[in-house]
Image (cartoon, rainbow, N blue to C red):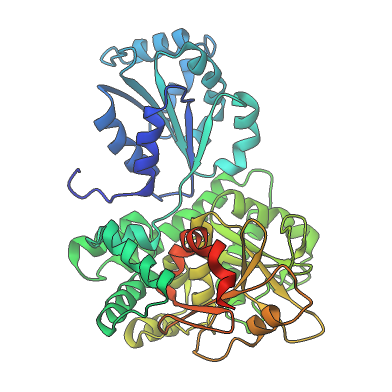
Amino acid sequence: MAEGYLRRKIDAYLVSWRADPNRKPLIVRGARQVGKTESILHFAKEAYGNVVYINFVEEPKYKLITEDGYKTEDIIRNISRMDPSRRFTEGDTLLFFDELQEYPEIAASLKFFKTDGRFDVICSGSLLGIHYRRIESNSVGYKTDYSMVSMDFEEFLWAKGYGGRDIEEMLWHMETLTPFNESAMKTYGNLFLDYCILGGMPAVVREYIEKGTFEGTLDIQRQLLEDYREDVRKYAEGMDQARILNVFEQIPVQLAKDNKKFQISKVAKGARFKDYRGCIEWLTDAGIIHVCYCLNFPELPLRGNYDDTKYKIYFFDSGLFVAMMDEEAQEDLRANKNLDVYKGALYENIVGEALVKCGYGLYYYKREDSTLEEDFFLRTKDSLVPVEVKATRGTAKSLRTLIESGKYPDIGWGIKLTGGNIGFSDGIYTFPYFCAFLLKEYIRRAEPDKFINF
């Protein structure tokens, strides 16, 4: 593996994609700076004899490669004319079109590349959600999509030298309800705290790994945040950029409230939901935020069973959320290891982020006529699993109500995430926060046997 390269989950996906004889051109999308280009180039250099890399931001002249049409031979000829040193060996050449958001029209060529079959194609870009209708209409049926996110805690553990055996051991503790020993709790707890502060942006993690300290990491995070603000100013075509930026800046402020529901009325004086709906969608499409919707009632199915006017907003990367906190909260977190800053908002953001990275959608529930409130819900084939994120080690009253009351037939057991160790009582499985990234695999393995416990 190349020196300094951070192993990512997309690595295994790309290898399997290359091995598929029926592979289609691949589009890798994700927020800015999550590691798309680095991972694809790392894979390409090992898997192909020739890599033709075209970056539409750095070399806009290559937008002219389609001036004769979108057929494979036309594009290859035009690339070759612009740069005669490029080599096109059939069956051993990858064309990598990067910064696709700058030239979505290239997607119209994917149909021809797939039909032609001589060359493999990968496209990549940020903010692709915003341009995806154009990309989809140009390439429907002739592409495969992969969404890349910032590093999850497992990838962070890989970067720190931990491997598959360590991950399996963590799962074994969860499946057998065997508490971690004191040393493991301290080790994983400290690593998780570091991960919470750093987040999973590769440039930040690499700085931390190479220096062994947090020196310079906050500067990188703040620059990334400024880059995102600049993206809003650059790419928010025909929309109120100020409104989008207002929403962006308000996320930490509103998560800090006891009631973490995002309120448009607090964003600006006289702000109305209908004026801001597009802003939320823009930030979601850009991959910068995750929206957690309020369920109408905690039951299956989840899709269509929520109120799209009631939601919480989380940052896609908790490290960037930390970097947006006020100085006092940051100091409390960094100096005193106080993860409870912002009234538990950081816990919720971290768990929400972990669930999205597992492939889950985000839903919560708050009953209007009582104190009943649940942070997240996961689903299995035929049951609903409430997840409570506890900033303290107190009782999970809402979780207990959902499990024990006869009003919620789809719920038979629940999960509580805390700073404490593994435990089980009255249908509630308790796990440390650092196990959140394993929840999907845990449920996949254990769910059929769950109900024998009570």
Which residue is depicted at the point 54% across and 11% down?
A: 69
Q: Position of residue 408 (x, y in %)?
A: 75, 73
- In this rendering, the count of numbered labels is 0
- The correct choice, above or below, for 123 with respect to 112 in the image is below
| Horizontal side of residue 211 vs 427, given as left or right | left
Q: Position of residue 284 (x, y in %)?
A: 61, 53
In the rendered image, is residue 315 in sight?
Answer: no
Farthest residue, direction bottom: 394
Nearest the viewer among 421 and 236 is 421
The quadrant of the rendering that contains the C terminus is bottom right
Farthest residue, direction front: 452
| Horizontal side of residue 286 vs 160, given as left or right | right
In the rendered image, is residue 202 in sight?
Answer: yes
Q: Position of residue 328 (x, y in %)?
A: 43, 85
- The correct choice, above or below, for 62 with respect to 17 in the image is above
The quadrant of the rendering that contains the N terminus is top left
- The correct choice, above or below, for 107 with respect to 5 in the image is above
Where is residue 13, by image quadrant?
A: top left
Nearest the viewer among 434 and 221 is 434
| Horizontal side of residue 21 vs 410, given as left or right | left
Q: Position of residue 210 (x, y in %)?
A: 19, 60
